Image (spheres, rainbow, N blue to C red):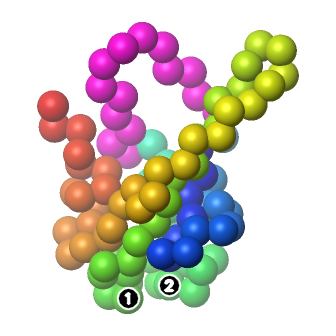
């Protein structure tokens, strides 16, 4: 699961999760998973981290890559997936309140 920052998502250079297995129907939630990678990704992009005021209103797009047993791949992209606001940690990672 990758993330691209900005409104013109062309570079999914923040890897939130390397690999995971999710099966079955229902709500899929990652409240804290990938948070450290997001922090590192912001820093690599020139921000000071999750507390940087410049990310207020920043758009981001999530890319999910599904690998099949035969080696095939399905790429899913949702644009825009996220918009970071004040209280962004709750907005991004705390949406699992269901």
User: From what the image shows, is residue 31 above or below residue 26?
Assistant: below
Question: Which of the 4 image quarters holds residue 14?
Answer: bottom right
Residue at 50% over, 20% down: 22
Q: CA distance from mark 2 to mark 1?
A: 7 Å
Q: Earlier in the sequence, mark 2 or mark 1?
A: 2
Q: Secondary structure at mark 2?
A: loop
Residue 13 within the segment the image draws in magenta: no
Relative to 47, 1 lies left or right: right
**33 or 65, nearer to the observer:** 65
**41 or 4, nearer to the observer:** 4
Question: Which of the 4 image quarters holds residue 37?
Answer: bottom right
User: From what the image shows, is residue 84 above or below residue 2?
Assistant: below
The N terminus appears in which quarter of the rendering? top right
Task: Please tell me the numbered disc located at residue 62.
Answer: none
Question: Which of the 4 image quarters holds residue 40?
Answer: bottom right
**88 or 39, nearer to the observer:** 88
Q: Outermost residue, right direction?
A: 71
Q: Outermost residue, left direction?
A: 98
Pointer 1 residue: 54
Image position, residue 18 (x, y; %)? 66, 40
Looking at the image, do the residues carrying marks 2 and 1 touch, with CB atoms under 8 Å apart? yes
Q: How many marks?
A: 2
The span shown in magenta is: 19-32
Pointer 2 residue: 47
- The kind of secondary structure the magenta stretch mainly shows is loop
User: From what the image shows, is residue 92 above or below residue 29?
Assistant: below
Residue at 37% over, 88% down: 54
Residue at 55% over, 75% down: 8
Image position, residue 65 (x, y; %)? 65, 38
**55 or 60, nearer to the observer:** 60
Label 1: how many Cα within 10 Å (few below 14, some 14–19, many 20+): few
Residue at 63% over, 77% down: 44
């Amino acid at each position: 699961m990758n993330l691209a920052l900005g409104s013109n998502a062309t570079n999914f250079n923040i890897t939130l999760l390397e690999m995971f297995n999710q099966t079955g129907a229902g709500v899929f939630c990652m409240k804290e998973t990938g948070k450290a990678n997001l922090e590192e990704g912001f820093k690599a992009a020139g921000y000071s981290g999750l507390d940087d005021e410049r990310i207020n209103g920043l758009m981001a797009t999530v890319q999910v890559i599904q690998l099949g047993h035969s080696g095939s791949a399905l790429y899913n992209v949702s644009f825009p997936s996220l918009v970071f606001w004040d209280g962004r940690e709750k907005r991004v990672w705390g949406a699992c309140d269901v």
